[in-house]
Amino acid sequence: MKFYQFNIESIGVASISEDVSVICMLDRLFQEKLVLPEYALQINFLGIVQERVAHKKALHEFLEKIAS
């Protein structure tokens, strides 16, 4: 089995409607145009704004530790 990955990001969009649109577009592409017999869309979610701020802070602290 082969594994391929790519990312699509909507930057500066406050609504998740753009994300939904991209997910639906990819699903249709895989089903209707590429006619893939088997595939999976794996979706990552970084949470609400407050959770992302906390995650960014923790990640920065972690990276600072391993860099020194």
Image (cartoon, rainbow, N blue to C red):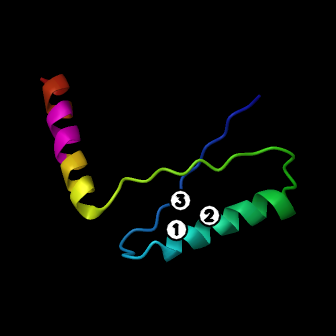
Q: Amino acid at mark 1?
A: Asp
**Mark 3: secondary structure:** loop
Q: Residue at x 68, y 34 (%)?
A: 3
Q: Quadrant of residue 25?
A: bottom right
Q: Position of residue 59 (x, y in %)?
A: 23, 39
- For disc 3, the marked residue is 8
Is the residue marked by circle 2 packed among few (<14), some (14-19), or many (20+) residues within 10 Å? some
Mark 3 vs mark 2, foreground winner is 2
Q: Quadrant of residue 52?
A: bottom left
Q: Amino acid at mark 2?
A: Ile
Q: Determine contact: label 1, label 2, CB under 8 Å.
A: yes
N-term mark: 1 or 3: 3
Instruction: Give the label on residue 59, or none.
Output: none
Q: Residue at x 62, y 64 (%)?
A: 23
Q: Residue at x 67, y 67 (%)?
A: 24
Q: Quadrant of residue 30?
A: bottom right
Q: CA distance from mark 3 to mark 2?
A: 9 Å
N-term mark: 3 or 2: 3
Magenta-drawn segment:
57-62
Left or right: 29 in relation to 14: right
Q: Position of residue 40 (x, y in %)?
A: 69, 46
User: Which residue is at the front of the view, 10 or 23?
Assistant: 23
Q: Position of residue 39 (x, y in %)?
A: 75, 45
Instruction: Give the label on residue 23, or none.
Output: 2
Q: Determine contact: label 1, label 3, CB under 8 Å.
A: no
Q: Is residue 47 above or below residue 63?
A: below
18 in magenta: no
Which secondary structure type mostly characterizes the magenta part of the structure? helix
- For disc 1, the marked residue is 19
Q: CA distance from mark 1 to mark 2?
A: 6 Å
Q: CA distance from mark 1 to mark 3?
A: 9 Å
